[in-house]
Amino acid sequence: MRPRFRLTRLLWAATIVMLQTGGPAAAQVIDMYGGGPFPAVRINGPFNPSAGQSFSAPAGFPVLNSFKLRLTQEIGTPVPVRFEVKAFDWTVVGHNFVAGAVGPALFSSEVVVTAPHPAQEEFTFNTGGIALLPEQDYIAMLTPLTDVWPSVRLAIQSDRDYEGGRLWHMIDDRFGGKRWTNVAPTDAVFRAEFSAAPTASPVPEPISLALFAPGLAVFGLLKRRRASS
């Protein structure tokens, strides 16, 4: 390659680098994975049909990229389950919680079948990047798709170490119907990774423009010499 062509390519490469945005923002993580063994809450068929961990996006990092939950399979019967992320609202009325997952699922997994033998299993899902609202709570939940008894157990922490949410599970008390509650102030064994929202390309800084202009001038001079030769 002749020197002038090599110089031309280097000038264009430098120009592109100057106008590009910086590298991706660092991730923020909610991590409630500790040592074991873990206690667990049973999820089964019609009586405890769903359970999950509520959470909120860390400040400045509203995009949920992935999450992970741990299940304990005790009876060795394969159970089909589905994992979802939904908005979650809750309040306290008197001595009772009024809570529930609201709206359509923001993420819904394919059907996952648990192990055909007693085991602890971890399930990790990449969400593709879900944009979350800063003032909204959410829940990463699972629902068995069978009425087998007992079904599966969601692994939980023995004590709480996360203030942005808690473990919830749905119950059917046969009188008041299905409702969300939490047995005790505890958390699921849960991990989620977040990133900052993507930003538009910034306007080049004056110093970048100052370097960019001489590069274009040299490039034009090289083209003029090439045309005259």
Image: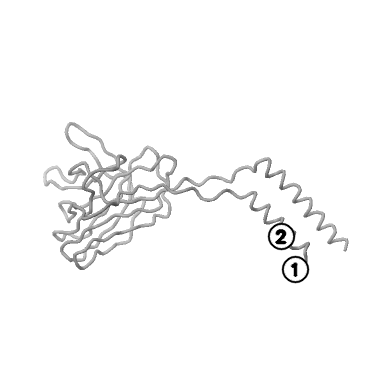
In x, y percent, where is residue 48? 17, 51
Kind of element beneath mark 2: helix
Q: Nearer the viewer, residue 110 or 78?
A: 78
Q: Seen from this angle, which residue lies furthest right?
A: 228
What is the C-alpha distance between the residues marked 1 and 2? Answer: 11 Å
User: How many circles with numbers are drawn on the protein?
Assistant: 2
In x, y percent, where is residue 56? 35, 42
The amino acid type, in three-letter code, at marker 1 is Met
In the rendered image, which quarter is residue 83 located in? bottom left
Query: Residue at horizontal 31%, vertical 53%?
Result: 84
In x, y percent, where is residue 31? 33, 49
In the rendered image, which quarter is residue 101 located in? top left
The amino acid type, in three-letter code, at marker 2 is Arg
Q: Nearer the viewer, residue 154 or 128?
A: 154
Asked whether the beta carbons under mark 1 and mark 2 sit within 8 Å of each other, the answer is no
In the rendered image, which quarter is residue 89 located in? top left
Kind of element beneath mark 1: loop
Q: Which mark is residue 1?
A: 1
Q: Seen from this angle, which residue lies furthest front?
A: 35
Query: Residue at horizontal 35%, vertical 57%?
Result: 125
Name the image quarter holding the C terminus: bottom right
Name the image quarter holding the N terminus: bottom right
Q: Earlier in the sequence, mark 1 or mark 2?
A: 1
Question: In the figure, 195 relative to 124: above or below?
Answer: above
Q: Residues within 10 Å of mark 2 (few under 14, many from 20)?
A: few
- Left or right of 160? Residue 1 is right
Residue behind mark 2: 9
Q: Nearer the viewer, residue 87 or 220?
A: 220
In x, y percent, where is residue 17? 64, 52
Question: In the figure, 186 relative to 8: above or below?
Answer: above
Q: Which mark is residue 202?
A: none
Q: Residues within 10 Å of mark 1 (few under 14, many from 20)?
A: few
